[in-house]
Image: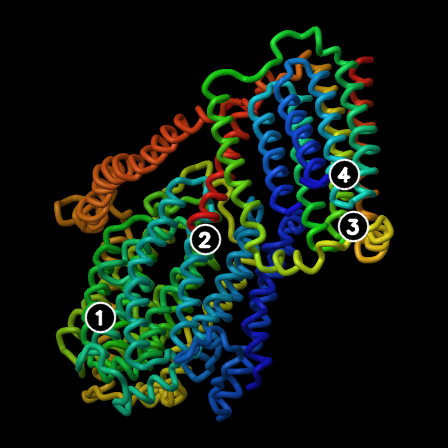
Amino acid sequence: MNPEQILFIFFGAISLIGAIAVISFRHPIYSALSLIVTFFAQAGLFVLLGAHFVAAVQVIVYAGAIMVLFLFVIMLLNLGTLSAQGAIGGKLKGFAIILGILLAAEGIYIAMNALNDTAVASAEAAAESVTTTTYDIGELLFTKYLLPFEVTSLILLAALIGVIVLVKREGQEEN
Amino acid sequence: MPLEYYLVLSALLFTIGVIGVLIRRNAIIIFMCIELMLNAANLAFVAISRSLGEATGQVFVFFVMTVAAAEVAIGLAIIVSVFKHRQTINVDEVNSLKG
Amino acid sequence: MSKELIVVLLVAPLVGFLINGLFGKWLKGNEKLSGWIGALAVLVSLVCSIIAFTSLNGGAAPFDETLYEWITGESFAFNIGFRVDALTAVMLLVITGVGFLIHVYSIGYMHGDEGYTRYFAYLNLFVFAMLILVLGNNYLMMFVGWEGVGLCSYLLIGFWYDKQSATDAGKKAFIVNRIGDFGFLLGMFTLFAAFGTLDFATMFDDAEADNFQKVFGASTLVVATLLLFVGAIGKSAQIPLYVWLPDAMEGPTPVSALIHAATMVTAGVYMIARSAVLYDIAHTGEVVAWIGVLTAFFAATIALAQNDIKRILAYSTVSQLGYMFVGVGVGAYASGVFHLVTHAFFKGLMFLTAGSVMHAMANELDMRKMGGLKAKMPITHWTFLIGALAIAGFPFLSGFWSKDEILHSAWGSSPLIYGIGLVTAFLTAFYMFRLIFGTFYGESRVEPEVESHLHESPPVMWLPLAILAIPSAVIGLLLGWGGHESWFHHFTKSVFPEAHHDASGNVLLFMVISSVIGLAGIAFAWTRYSKRAPSDEPTNAMHKFVANKYYVDEVYNSLIVQPIKNASHYLLWRIVDNGVIDGIVNGVAAIIRVIGGTLRRFQTGLVQAYIVSMVLGIVLFLAYYLFFA
């Protein structure tokens, strides 16, 4: 067992446990905290994969910004005082879990057979050791993917406006 | 580490997200599960990017995160609106679609 | 004769129609303008017709040209093409000449009517359609005009659409004509199947050269010509489809004059004259002649017992159309068309005078309530008298010449037809003078309040009467002097096949016989009706039978209309519509409701239930692609 394998098992286990915790806790605030744990574990996995930039963004954007938003909303709505916010009941739940297991089985099957795909397999051997740096990503973003990159700024702008409109209408109705 | 391990982990995380969406009633938790699924996809992206030795996959992760951020902002605003109208965010109580 | 001339001739009434039809709303305040626009449009056509006629008369070659390819297929082509030969030129003069005078007359007659502009729009459209009918150089064009005049006839009969009897009469005319048109269509199909074209020129050449597909064996042309004749029976009101024409008198009187006496109803005669080559080869003329002579006699007997002056004129029209069919049937095409021309003038004249009488009598039509109108309406009286003398075959007036020619030709073909025709001539003279004596002579039976404002019609109405009276009197002499050697026969010789009937016998003798018969009819009417009014009630069974038009309408009603109505009611409505069609419709709805009722249970409104089904779909698709694809 080399250190990489140990770290993979460590981070992988934490992210899985965190994920299961997210869907298991009754109270959303615990779910949110579990999700943050999962995100940190995934950031570790990204580091293992040599994607340092993505790992940093993961921590800053997801764990830092997005989850803070979640926490704010949970606190704003004060959901803890509401009762019975657990899982849905009965047959639908059982059916959903069976479906989930089937989906997982199919996902694992695909993952195990991914290297049978010739294109991936041939690239695998050649590029095992090559690591990508932040420099590479920046170059791609500002050359080949310049247009999609600019479009993301539009998406953010649209989201900004959308949120303002939603909140503003709310305020007017209250008056 | 072989690629398959990462992909299997990704598939498991994704499935947990799916199950969460299916069984939870709280809209915020459902939202978190969606984030979980997006992250699972991100993991697969990065893993394959590493194994192919190029940065394109990581660029896509960047895009996914941007979209996720925008989506969370809008989604949470909607949840807040719904809550103000109905005093609940339980999806089984928001059933205007019932035929 | 240039292409432009023909186009102007044809399009002028269309322009009039468009102006009156589209801008009638703005013309309403100024009805004189509207009327004169209509009349002017026809006047333009009349001038063009005269130019075309003179150039033809001067020896110019007939015009026959395709202006526009209408429908082109792999093996066929239908073209918009026109043909102006002697026959068309004659028809053009009649249509535009009589048409123009009737337009002018209408300006006065329709004065103050609610639908003034609409009336002139329809009338112009009618002239346009009629011109297409006679100008077309193929059967399809003729059919377009044929249907066009049918439509206008329907519109104008039901012109006063708030009157139930008028709309009923319009519908009757339309439906009865439809039966005939069906025959016309089948005839056209047969001809197309046989010749592969509907162009007159090619078709007649091929027919003469016996160069066509024998779709019905040796009797191909017999079938085709008889089917075409069914169309003529409908349009020209012959037995058994004549019933619509008397009812058509519900329309305004100038319409009766133009459409139901002078032009449209003669379309059948024109069509047979146009197809003379085919009828000659098929030898179906005899059928035409017999139907014609029977109609002539039958309608004349009905006219004997009518008291409504327009109805008498209507039956007289049916009867005279019968004469024309005798003419074209026995192969004397020129004589038949000649009678068409003279009839257009004198019958148009008589209808217009009847309209003048109606105008003065506050729309009274029953001659039992007339009498002694001569003193009050001298011009109307004299012009009507000229028309009546002409139709009665008074020597040297126009009807005398044309009718005599037909009878003479009929003698050569079948003495029996000649005999019936002669009796009919006697009856014609009799009922016409019964009408004259009843209306214009004797003591006045007019109701006092009507009598107080009895008056002669305004100049815009009596001038056309006076003008029409001139050709009614002299046109026969001018065109028909000399029997079969006359100018008219000479002019139209190029169009018709060589007469094959025996024109033997002493022409003069025939003339004398006809004259005597006509005069005898007049004299007989004089002895009976000059002193006393037409009888009020039928005196014996036979009279009653005739006065009720042989109960033909009633027979048609019980034999055809009622069975169809009953079938529609009990079979089509009760069973087919209510049972089958409604059953299918309601059944479909019920099935949908059951399906919907089942499916709506899936619409729980629970978002998660929807997502579960979505995930199920994903799982199944993935399974399919991974393990089965």
- Of the numbered discs in the image, which one, if any, rests on residue C517? 1
Q: Are marks 4 and 3 in one subunit?
A: no
Give the labeled residue for mark 3: A148
Tag 1: Cα neighbours inside 10 Å, few (<14), some, or many (≥20)?
many
Q: Are marks 1 and 4 in one subunit?
A: no
Query: Which type of secondary structure does the marked residue at label 1 adopt?
Result: helix
Amino acid on which disc 4 is placed? Met
Quadrant for the N terminus of chain C, please: bottom right
Q: Are marks 3 and 1 in one subunit?
A: no
Q: Which chain is disc 2 placed on?
A: C
Query: Which type of secondary structure does the marked residue at label 2 adopt?
Result: helix
Q: Are marks 3 and 2 in one subunit?
A: no
Amino acid on which disc 3 is placed? Pro
C149 above or below C590?
below
- The answer to whether residue C567 is left or right of residue C197 is left
Amino acid on which disc 1 is placed? Ile
Give the labeled residue for mark 4: B65
Q: Are marks 4 and 2 in one subunit?
A: no
Q: Percent x, y for residue A58? A: 79, 36
From mark 4 to mark 3, how far is it between C-alphas?
13 Å
Q: Which chain is disc 4 placed on?
A: B
Give the labeled residue for mark 2: C156
Dividing the picture into quarters, in which one does residue B65 lie? top right
C253 above or below C502?
above
Tag 2: Cα neighbours inside 10 Å, few (<14), some, or many (≥20)?
many
Disc nearest the viewer among 4 and 3: 4
- Of the numbered discs in the image, which one, if any, rests on residue C51? none
Tag 3: Cα neighbours inside 10 Å, few (<14), some, or many (≥20)?
some
Tag 4: Cα neighbours inside 10 Å, few (<14), some, or many (≥20)?
many
From mark 1 to mark 4, how far is it between C-alphas?
113 Å
Q: Percent x, y for residue A88? A: 54, 17
